[in-house]
Image (spheres, helix red, strand yellow):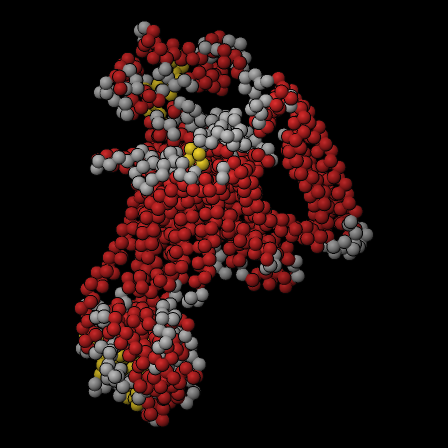
Amino acid sequence: MFNFYLLLLILLISFIFFYFGYRQAHILKTLQNQKLHSLSHYYGLYVLLSSLLPSLGLYFVLTICDDVVFAYMIKTYIPLDVLNSKDYNFNIVLAQIKNSVDGLIFGAPPQWVSDTAEIWKTWVFKSNIVTFILCFITSIISGYFGFLKINSKFRSRNAVERIIMTLLAISSVIAILTTIAIIFSVIFESIRFFVLIPFDEFLFGTVWNPQFEGAERAGSGQEGLSQYGAVPLFAGTFLISFIALSVSIPIGLFSAIYLSEYATSKERAIFKPLLEILAGIPTVVYGFFAALTVAPFLRSSGSFFGLDVASESALAAGLVMGIMIIPFISSLSDDVINAVPQSLRDAGYGLGSTKNETVLKIVLPAALPGVVASIILAVSRAVGETMIVVMAAGLAANLTANPLEAVTTVTSQIVTILVGDQEFESAKTLSAFALALTLIIITLGMNFYALHIVKKYKEQYD
Amino acid sequence: MTNKLINPTRASEIVKNSIAKRRAKDNRLKLYGRIAIGFAVCFLIFLFSSIFIKGYPGFFQYYVTLDINFDRERIDPQGDLSDNSLFNGEASKIVNEALFTIIDPKGRKAKKQAKKMVSSGKDVRLTNLVKSNPNLFGTISSVKFALDDDIDSFLRGYIKRETPESERRISDQIIKFVDKLDKEGRISYEFSDYILNGSASGNPEMAGIKGAFFGSILTLSVCLLIAFPLGVATAVYLEEVAKKNKITELIEVNINNLAAVPSVVFGIMGLAIFISIFGMPRSIPLVGGMVLALMTLPTIIISSRAAIRAVPPSVRDAAYGIGASKLQVIFHHVIPLAMPGMLTGTIIGMAQALGETAPLLMIGMVAFIVDVPNSVMDPGTVLPVQIFMWADFAERMFIQKTSAAIIILLGFLISMNAFAIYLRKKLERRW
Amino acid sequence: MINEENDFRKLDLTVGDVFSKDARLKARNVNVFYGNNKAIDNVTIDIGNKEVISFIGPSGCGKSTFLRCFNRMNDTIDTCRVEGKITLEDENIYDRKIDVVPLRARIGMVFQKPNPFPKSIYDNVAYGPRIHGLCENKDHLDGIVEQSLKRAGLWEEVNDRLLSAGTGLSGGQQQRLCIARAIAVSPEVILMDEPCSALDPIATAKIEELIHELGNEYSIVIVTHSMQQAARVSKRTAYFHLGKLIEVGKTKNIFTRPKHSQTEAYISGKIG
């Protein structure tokens, strides 16, 4: 609440400054008959911005930093016996303290937790006061300096526009910051993981059996209990993606060919959007459908044929995922096929080709780079898909090529590990980051490759 | 040199003979195309009808009408309608008494079973009633209470009378009670007021999506408030202001990459940075909205850029010609003209964000939260995550409610997309 | 000089020798519509055996449209409707029972802008024989490819790089490749729609020479907007104006002693 009111106050002050700036410009124009470069509201805007931006920036810096600083400082207040105890874990302690601060008290926490929480709360209180005063003063002072600048020589509109352009540029940088944030967060934790578990064991090991070490520190010599060989996960991802693609590629391609070459415009107007709907259905709905309808159906029809189909089979997840991916292939391929120039088709027809000969021997080969790219993008989507596999495929890391068995995937493990209680130090939690890193490398790699293919072969008939 | 080329007449004959087979192949390809599309459409129909069939009953529940003696001293002992007073009152007991007068259970075992017949939310229902309508005190009025989910399943026919008692979830005794209530016309099948008003609950008959719904609204609002301005600002910058140099290329490559990153990874980033480093609380719509905003940003940027590019240069030239500055051209001319396209892209992006589950799981919006979140800082969950959580529960009624929740979710998505298409058609300009 | 007022015009007949003794293709009262617009108005003409005939006329007079009627390429345009009769050896090609595929194998086409397939030179030429099943074995196919390229005057230049991309050739070479491609299916008639308009003068000269030679084997109908080109390559010329066939005759005569006043106007540059 405090934050909200402070922000409101800063905003209010800046509006007041706007008024003064506007009025000043107006006075200069009318009463003192000075020629001003810009319209009055630009002067108001300038003063507003000069009051608002510095104090807003200061506010964000202080709010974000104080938590970090407090966490650092609170260390000195943790009782020595807790610090030295065997299962000391700073993150857990921090969480306990924070819970107490937020008022989430379950049962009777140890006394030292309540005490440190009280200390923390006083810090928060002090920091709030400091933030308030600093922001308030900053907004007034910087606003005043902005106000002083108003005179006949000042080109307010240009100044305002420069500021706005800078803001626009900064917002664009957010995209880069996000990428950096993703890379940073994943790599940092992955490195900590690979310190504990050697690289090759992760990539080539065939047993995936992470355990929570509980109070025990990771890597303190208890190998043999937990194993982090990711091969079963890769195999599971591969198996399910393979099933998905064997559904989506034929359906997607044939649909695309029909829609672009054979369909009447009425048919196209109806069926193209219908296929796109498949892409708009949330994956949780697909997962629900896969788990509650497809999987039992496969299981019962399997037993009808004497096959033992697991209740969480790779086949169920793969089939549904395949259907979800159809639009990726059909839409993109359709676009690429349509982009093939009509002159090539004319040449084919002129020689006496039937439609299917023209499509299969002339158009598709010409569109092939785009089609291949769309398939790669579909694979990338399949590999990164989470909800369908979490809900319909299993959690058992099973190294198999049998689609009737339950397997698990990279994404499924990431979710399982990170949802629920975590200790940030343990190898199990860190393994999720290592998996995420592999996932990012694979999907981004595929996307780059797809773009590369399109670029490389694009010149062919342009 | 011998003429290798075939004599035209001969060639013509060969071609004529080959026609039948080639036409057959042509028709086959056409057929495959139709089968493929047909398969996809059939699946779509199958999916929607399956969800609808499962979910439609989820909007309805069985209720029992009981005559409640609104004895003030027993319900509100302190007489002030405070929560404390009502908590200490005997609301549950009163409801059970009303029930017992009708079915007259004999013996401790029967009474114990009978107490479970009405949903355990009965006391809350009663106390809410008196809070909103204190005039009820001193009267005997009929109130509808939801029945426990096992009885509900029995009434729907999923639990069969014929099954031997040991394999059934409800006993013969309960069935006798239910029959009695039914004979007196006290059992009704009505639109459930829990599905929309209730929140997460372990009891299927009380479960509802209200909490998740508001959570979704809050989260999406945060997402929109962050992603739309940022997205438009970035699109404007890249298209109108920035010079084409290495840095802008880098930004563009970045944006395209972000569009390709799996959603889980955004959740991980949110977990590692917003929660671990910045120390924000888990499970709140603010963090969820921030993560979703970063995910939706590429979509909004790409569609906004397309919309800006569609504005013809002649408009800009005219504005510059009058002496407008660059920003004036952008804000007075380009953005208003490109706004329909930007809005359409944003709505579609929001629709995608509404259906996202995985990243929100990562940042913890998956806890069992009963209260409806009131602000972006209160812990909450979103509709797709609620569906995910319910999907694990095996009770029949949960399956129905989950399907009902899916119907609601799909309803929103369809409306949002339809709105976007409508906007696009209506505001489309032919330059 | 025959003018509008003369009997011929009143009967709306074409001037000159419309018919040929040894006709390959006979067009009778052909009308072509794009939607409601009439593009070709009641045209009757014979295409003789092993002759080169040019269609000339100002832009937009319908010569390309009429040309495309002969191999039913107008079928690919949804709004186009063709009425009348065109017979190839006494079979009306617009008859419902006729399959368009063998027709197009007998009547080949070369387009205005060279459009080789993005395949190798060999595969470009081999495409037609392959789909029609004209060859029994690889040697036979090799022979057909070689022969076609030789007839198109391209063999010398490309025989060492048959597997390189067809699109890597120069404009003139590409067009000759397209001609070779058409020849490979052993057509009887080759239709050419302004084949040189996208080419430089040297390439144009080479192709004109080629057409002259090909006229000994095939009936060639060439649409051209260049009167000089018509004079160079064809024995017979047909002058079209606004969808009507005005005059047909020996090229020499058309250009020196045209019978119709409109023809004369076009030739002397007064219109067009």
Compared with A90, B122 (above or below) is above
Between residue B255 and residue A20, name the one nearer to us.
B255
Compared with A325, B213 (above or below) is above
The count of marks equals 0
Residue, far top: B107
- The quarter of the rendered structure image containing the N terminus of chain B is bottom left
Residue, far front: A221
Q: Is residue B295 visible?
A: yes
Between residue C98 and residue A415, name the one nearer to us.
A415
C103 to the left or right of C172: left
Q: Looking at the picture, how far across and down is residue A433, in whole percent? A: 50, 39
Q: Quadrant of residue C57?
A: bottom left
Q: Residue at x 34, y 93 (%)?
A: C257
Compared with B274, B298 (above or below) is below
Compared with A361, A12 (above or below) is above
Q: Looking at the picture, how far across and down is residue C233, in whole percent? A: 34, 87
C61 to the left or right of A211: left
Q: Residue at x 78, y 49 (%)?
A: A149
Q: Looking at the picture, how far across and down is residue A132, in whole percent? A: 71, 33
Q: Is residue B183 visible?
A: no
Q: Residue at x 32, y 42 (%)?
A: A401
Q: Residue at x 30, y 40 (%)?
A: A402
Between residue C205 and residue A241, name the one nearer to us.
A241
Between residue B396 and residue B176, name the one nearer to us.
B396
Q: Looking at the picture, how far across and down is residue B278, in whole percent? A: 60, 35
Residue, far right: A32
